[in-house]
Image (tube, helix red, strand yellow):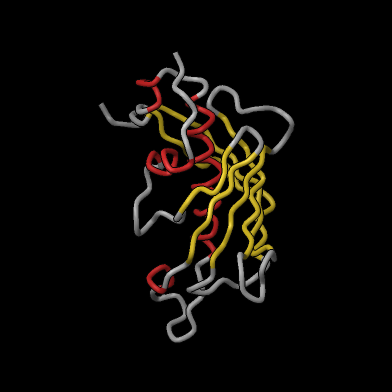
Amino acid sequence: MTMPLPTPAELLSLVPQRPPLRFIDRIVEVDDEQIVSEYTWKDADCAGHFPGNPVVPGVKMVEMGVQTGLVAWGIYWMRQRVQGGELIRLRPLLTRLEQGRFKKMVRPGDTLVCRARLAGAKAPSQGALSANVDISFRGGSKDGEIAFSAIASGLWVDKDCEKQP
């Protein structure tokens, strides 16, 4: 029996990443069509990255997109497809990032919204998920402008699949 669909708050609690490597403050909305998350960047997120003129490292924006589009949304999708006990044995892995584009500089204090939609017309199958990810500014002079976009693909695998015997 599959588990009931989680609320956005429940879904966020299931995302395994934790600070300082979690780049989702809240999940704004989630359904079969899309997931939307939000994060406000902090000085600590930029520590050492251009001291005196901090900029959010691009790899952290990629991680925000992956955490939203593959991890959180993947949990949403997998809860519809697997037994409850099976989900805790699975972990999402990033397998591909395509067409990644950094379009705007992001600084501490900027709030970004990540919107992920299915890449292609079909729902995830056999643990695979691909999402079109757009990360844009919320508020301020750049409100609505896209900071980063990509197609992120991942695969849900048994968390013990590569342990040495």
Give the residue drawn at x 39%, y 21%. 84
Work out which quarter of the rendered image holds the C terminus and state it: top left
Residue 18, how many percent across, how many down? Answer: 34, 51
Q: Quadrant of residue 44?
A: bottom left
Q: Which residue sits furthest right?
A: 121
101 horizontally vs 69: left or right: right
Give the residue drawn at x 59%, y 53%. 114
Count of numbered circles on the image: 0
Residue 117, how many percent across, how many down? Answer: 66, 41
Residue 41, how many percent across, how many down? Answer: 47, 67
Q: Which residue sits furthest left?
A: 165
Work out which quarter of the rendered image holds the N terminus and state it: top left
Q: Which residue sits furthest bottom?
A: 52
112 horizontally vs 132: left or right: left
Q: Quadrant of residue 22?
A: bottom left
Residue 19, how many percent across, how many down? Answer: 34, 56
Give the residue drawn at x 53%, y 38%. 73
Pick the front one: 42 or 3: 3
Relative to 63, say whether 48 is above or below: below
Relative to 12, say whether 129 is above or below: above
Relative to 7, say whether 52 is above or below: below
